[in-house]
Amino acid sequence: MPEEIDLKRAQAFARQVFGFYTGGVISLLVHIGYKTGLFDAAATGPGTSEGIAARAGLDERYVREWLGGMTTAGIFTYDSASRTYSLPPEHAFCLTGESRLNVAPVSGFIPHLGKIVPKVMDAFRHGGGVPYSEFRPEFTELMDDSWRRIYDDALLSGFLPRVMGLPERLAAGVRVADIGCGTGHAINLMARAYPASTFVGYEIAQDAVARATAEARRMGLSNARFEVLDITRLPTDPKFDVIMAFDTIHDQRDPAAALKRASDALAPDGMFVMVDVKGTSDVQEDTKNPFAPFYYGVSVLHCMTVSLAERGAGLGTMWGEKVARRMLGEAGFTQIGVVDAPRPQNVIYVARK
C-alpha cells in the first residue's frame, strides 16, 4: 500500500466506482420499464404512480418504487404538489418507439450477460471460455431487437450510401452474401429494395436462420435465402460480387480464416463490406472513445469468450482499425478503406482484391 494517499482523489474515485454500480442497477430498471411497457405508458403524459400503473396494467406499489428510481436517476421528473411523474419528451424519444435512437433495448444485455459472469470467472481462473450455446436463444433475441431498428432506420439510407458505388451495383444486379447474418433482417431489407440482385445469408445459429427465412416468406421475397453454415466454409464458386459482414468477424473462432474465405469467394472486381465496432487497436487511444468501456466489457462477457471456448483466436470486440487492416491485408485484400458509419459506435471497412 502506498505510504501517502491523496484522500480527496480516493474519495472522488470511490464516488466514480459507486456511479458504475448505480448505472448497473438503473440499467436493470430501464430493462424493466422497456419490457413491461412502463415507458410507453408514461410517454402519453404525466401521471401519478396509480395512473401510470393503471395505464401499463401493473401493480402500483412496484411502479411507485420504480418511478422513484427513475426520478432520482434523472430519467423522470416529479411534481410533489400534484404527485405526478413525467417522462420528458426528449427522454421518451430515446426510450420508446421503433427508431434506432431508442436505446432501451440495449438494457437487456445487462441481465443477460450478468447470468454468464460466474462461468466467465471460471474461465479467468482456468482458461477456455463460455460457448455460444450458453447465450442462446436470448442473445439472438437481443441482437435482433437492437439491430433490427438500426437496419430499419439506417441501412438503406445510411450504411449502404457510405460505400461509394454500392447502391448502384445493388440496383444493377449483383450476387451478394451476408456472412454471420443473424436473423437476416438486413438481407431481407436489401432484397426488397434491390430486386435485381440476389442475396444469401449465412449464419451458424439454426433458430436465427429459421426466423430469417420466415421473414423472407412474409415479405414475399424470391431473391433472398438463408443457410446454416460456418462462414469459414463459405462457398467460393460461383463468386460473389459483394460480401458483407455486420458486427460479426470479431466473434469468430478463426477470424483470419473467415476473412481469407471471404477474399477467396469474392469476384475479382467485388467488394467486401465489413461493419464493425470502432476501435484503434490501442488501449491508450481507446480511452478517448466514450463507447470503449462498454465494448471492452461486452468483449469479456461475450465476444472474446465465445471464441476462446472453441480454442479460437479470442480477437475481442475492440480489435480495432490497425489489427483489422493488417488482417484484411493478410487475407488477400489489397485496397482497404475505412469510412464512418451512420452511428458513432461503428466504422465501415471497404476492401477489394
Image (cartoon, grey):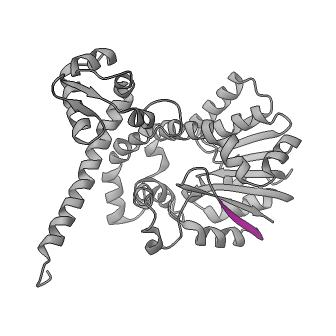
Q: Position of residue 288 (x, y in %)?
A: 44, 67
Residue name at image x 33 percent, y 31 percent: 87
Where residue 284 sits, quadrant-wise, is bottom left
Residue 72 picture quarter:
top left
Q: Classify residue 143 as left or right of residue 340.
A: left
Give the overall secondary structure of the magenta segment. strand
Quadrant of image for the C terminus: bottom right
Residue 8, above or below 56: below
Q: Position of residue 46 (x, y in %)?
A: 30, 23
Q: Is residue 236 left or right of residue 142?
A: right
Observer-nearest of 250 and 121: 250
Q: What x and y, as percent, mark residue 52? A: 28, 20
Res. 288 in view: yes
Residue positioned 26% across, 44% down in the render: 25
Q: Where 318 falls versus 131 (above or below)?
A: below
Residue located farthest toward the bottom when viewing the structure as drawn: 3
Q: Which residue appears at 43% of the width and 42% of the height? A: 106
Residue 127 falls left or right of residue 223 = left
Q: How many marks?
A: 0
In the rendered view, does 251 fall on the left or right side of 29? right
**Nearer-the-camera pick, 288 or 192:** 288
Q: Is residue 228 visible?
A: no
Identify the residue shown where x is 38% and y is 47%.
113
In reply to whether residue 301 is colored magenta, the answer given is no
Estimate the x, y position of residue 39 in percent, counting from the top left. 36, 28
- Decide: is 245 above or below 16: above
Q: Which quarter shows the N terminus?
A: bottom left
Q: Is residue 333 magenta?
A: yes
Q: Which residues are magenta?
A: 332-339
Q: Is residue 34 above or below residue 297?
A: above
